[in-house]
Image (tube, coloured by chain):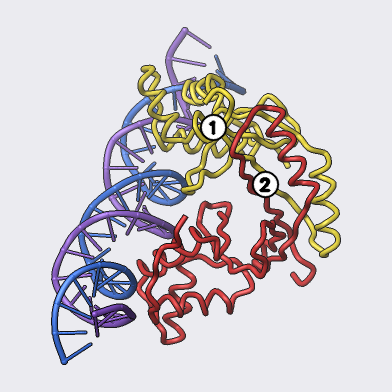
Chain colours: A red, B yellow, C purple, D blue
Amino acid sequence: MTEAVRRQTRQQAAVLAALDAAAEFVSAQQLHSRLRDQGASVGLATVYRTLTALAAQDEVDVLRTDDGEAVYRRCASDEHHHHLVCRVCGRAVEVDGPAVEDWAARVSAAHGFRDVRHTLEIFGTCDRC
Amino acid sequence: MTEAVRRQTRQQAAVLAALDAAAEFVSAQQLHSRLRDQGASVGLATVYRTLTALAAQDEVDVLRTDDGEAVYRRCASDEHHHHLVCRVCGRAVEVDGPAVEDWAARVSAAHGFRDVRHTLEIFGTCDRC
DNA sequence: CGCCTAATTGACAATGATTCTCATTTCCGT
DNA sequence: ACGGAAATGAGAATCATTGTCAATTAGGCG
């Protein structure tokens, strides 16, 4: 599993910086326009390429909104974790639940499933909204 | 919350029948072509409308594939449950995990989130694949 | 049993996110 | 500085999904 070699470019640095500046999950389109507004415009295709690459290396977490749009977030934790996402402001809290991991493993095994992976996100309205 | 009144039409019955005939999660496009192949062709827009209506009434479960496509399934259980989905054949097993529900409620409350809802799916390779 | 009207349908256009193409630009080791 | 490989960007292409609107149809009513 060799990490893809990536050159250091202004564009990729800008995308990463914009992600770090966001506390919520943002879409590629949102990032693209934020970057443009900041005067550090990056082509839309490049934003997509960069996000895809980052996601492939687990540098960012990806999830899908109800309408199927992909949204990305740079998380503090490198480890496996889940999210509590505010459906109003988009703010996300990273949470982990060993009990859930165990349950998932147990259930998968009981049904003979291999190479399991799971997705779990909790959506709600946060106390500030 | 009054249930929308729906007329009984050949098209809606056909979509329901096709869903019942499928053990896996299927996309609107797949349903549309299966119906066409069976000679019971239903317009694509109608397939979408019907699925959306069924989903709104919790008659079918919806989830998103990794590439963002919506897939639907008629589940045996009316109650809240989750899925163990085979990433090869698409077969799905309905599972429930009270421990997970509790955990989600606890975590949400701890962070002051209201009106929470969660999504949890486990993807793996089943023993037949 | 036919009629009437509103709900439903379907072909097609329109939208919107994402990916592809390819000519141009930019890294970076030499 | 140079050269080739990698990255970029503008726009076209793709694909799922939704909107439009005229034609069809279900179902209550006389």
Q: Nearer the viewer, residue B10 or A86?
A: A86
Disc 1 target residue? B25
Query: Does A72 sit left or right of B103 as displayed?
Result: left
The x, y position of residue B107, in whole percent, is 82, 57
Mark 2: amino acid: Thr
Q: Which numbered circle lies on residue B119?
A: 2
Quadrant of the image for the C terminus of chain A? bottom right
Residue A85 lies in quadrant: bottom right
The x, y position of residue A57, in whole percent, is 51, 61
Sequence-first tag of 1 and 2: 1
User: Chain ID for label 1?
Assistant: B
Residue A68, relative to residue B128: is it above or below? below
Residue A30, relative to residue C28: is it above or below? above
User: Chain ID for label 2?
Assistant: B
Mark 1: amino acid: Phe
Residue D27 lies in quadrant: top right
SS at badge 1:
loop
Residue at the (51%, 43%) spot, across then down: B65
Local crowd at mark 2 within 10 Å, few (<14), some, or many (≥20)? few
Residue B70 visible in the current orientation: yes
Q: Nearer the viewer, residue A121 or B5?
A: A121
